[in-house]
Amino acid sequence: MDAFIAKLFATISSVKSAYAQLQYAQFPYDSEAIQSADQIVVSDLKILSELKQSFLKKHLDDSAPETTLLVSEIEEQKNLLKTYEITTKKLDSQTKLKESEIIFLKEKLEETRRENKLIEKRLNSSGLLSNLANSSNFNFASLTPSNFVTVLKQTTKSIRNLVKFMIVGMESANWDLDSAANSIQPGVVYWDPTHICYAFESFVCREMFDGFNFPEFVKTGNRQRRRYFFDKFTELKSLKAREYATLEPESKFAGFCKSKYLKLVHPKMELSLFGDLSQRNLVNAGKLPETDFFDLFLDVAKRVWLLHCLAFSFGPDTSVFHVANGSRFSEVFMDSVNEEAFLSPVTSPEVGFTVVPGFKVGKTVIQCQVYSI
């Protein structure tokens, strides 16, 4: 009876294996494999029918049951192995298909980005884009958090342009970017090597937004009325940063630019990137270096100052906030700059570090941008 049951299970496993082969051969269509699997299924069903008749008639084969038992167990294991191999091939095929889809979607995304850049370029050349930007509704009597979000997006874009320039300069100076990123955000394991740019972005944001909660970025700043800050916002908004700082060299904004540059750009970094400390010396003397890097810095300084003035136009309730490293991700207070951490259904993502701080504008929470791990 043991030998009979073993032979029965071996035959059933053969049917399963042949059926798996039959399914696998359907896509891509393989007529020979389908025919071979079909013949095996028919043969095995015939054997099962014969086993059934033998059992009902109690005519079990009693010759060498030990050998039959052993051979049947070996056959069953072979069939199981064959089934697993077919399943593996099927999964490999599905993986390759998904990879092809990913490549296609990436190409489509890149194509869309190129088209967007062309559209933006045409808008810039026609002047439509600048007209749209200048037509933003910033009216003191009807300020809303959406106005704040608009300026924040412009600020973030400006910061990323500066970071890109810095990274290119560091690469040209043969910096070890991984070590530099680790010195800013220690111990973070990045999902992608290119994600170290977020560490440099977090550094720029940390330095530029330091003191944001204080009027004019200093603890002793004058607590003026909301209208005062909105007027300062309007005054700077229509001018270029260099133009305003040149016209008002003793202004709070000019002092802000000087202090932030000296804090953001370490002397060793400036010497490594530019070969000398001429920019630093000019800034210390109250002058504005005429370099591409400093122009990008001035644009960041202007955006951050505008955001600061707009924040205090809402009143003293507006504040900036960061999320502690290792905190649990919250969709209410955070937005992730990377999606990889959300692909696992098992673990919930944590905050590696805050990239761009969040803000509270009255009762409205504007999410901070974080790198998730």
Image: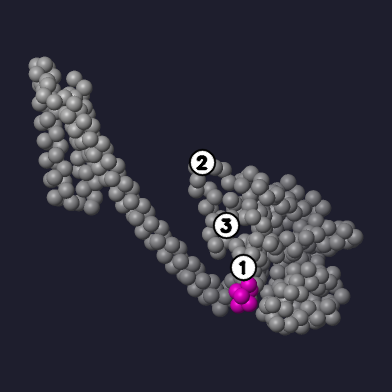
Please state which of residues 352 and 164 is positioned toward the viewer in this rendering: 352
Residue under numbered circle 1: 177
Residue under numbered circle 2: 346
Residue 216 shows up from this direction: yes
Q: CA distance from mark 1 to mark 2?
A: 32 Å
Residue 322 coordinates in the image, percent (x, y): 71, 52
Which stretch appears magenta? 170-175
Vertical side of 350 occupied by 355: above or below: below
Q: Amino acid at mark 2?
A: Val
Tell me if 149 is positioned left or right of 281 in this view.
left
Vertical side of 341 occupied by 52: above or below: above
Vertical side of 80 occupied by 314: above or below: below
Question: In which image quadrant can residue 273 be found?
Answer: bottom right
In the image, what residue occupies the spot 70% across and 56% down?
357
Residue under numbered circle 3: 190
In the image, what residue occupies the spot 63% across and 72% down?
175
Q: Amino acid at mark 1?
A: Leu
In the image, what residue occupies the spot 73% across and 56% down?
143
Per the image, label 2 sits on a secondary structure element best described as loop
Per the image, label 1 sits on a secondary structure element best described as helix
Residue 50 coordinates in the image, percent (x, y): 10, 26
Tell me if 184 is positioned left or right of 223 in this view.
left
Please state which of residues 247 and 140 is positioned toward the viewer in this rendering: 247
Residue 116 coordinates in the image, percent (x, y): 50, 68
Q: Amino acid at mark 3?
A: Tyr
Please state which of residues 347 and 138 is positioned toward the viewer in this rendering: 347
Question: In which image quadrant can residue 196 be found?
Answer: bottom right
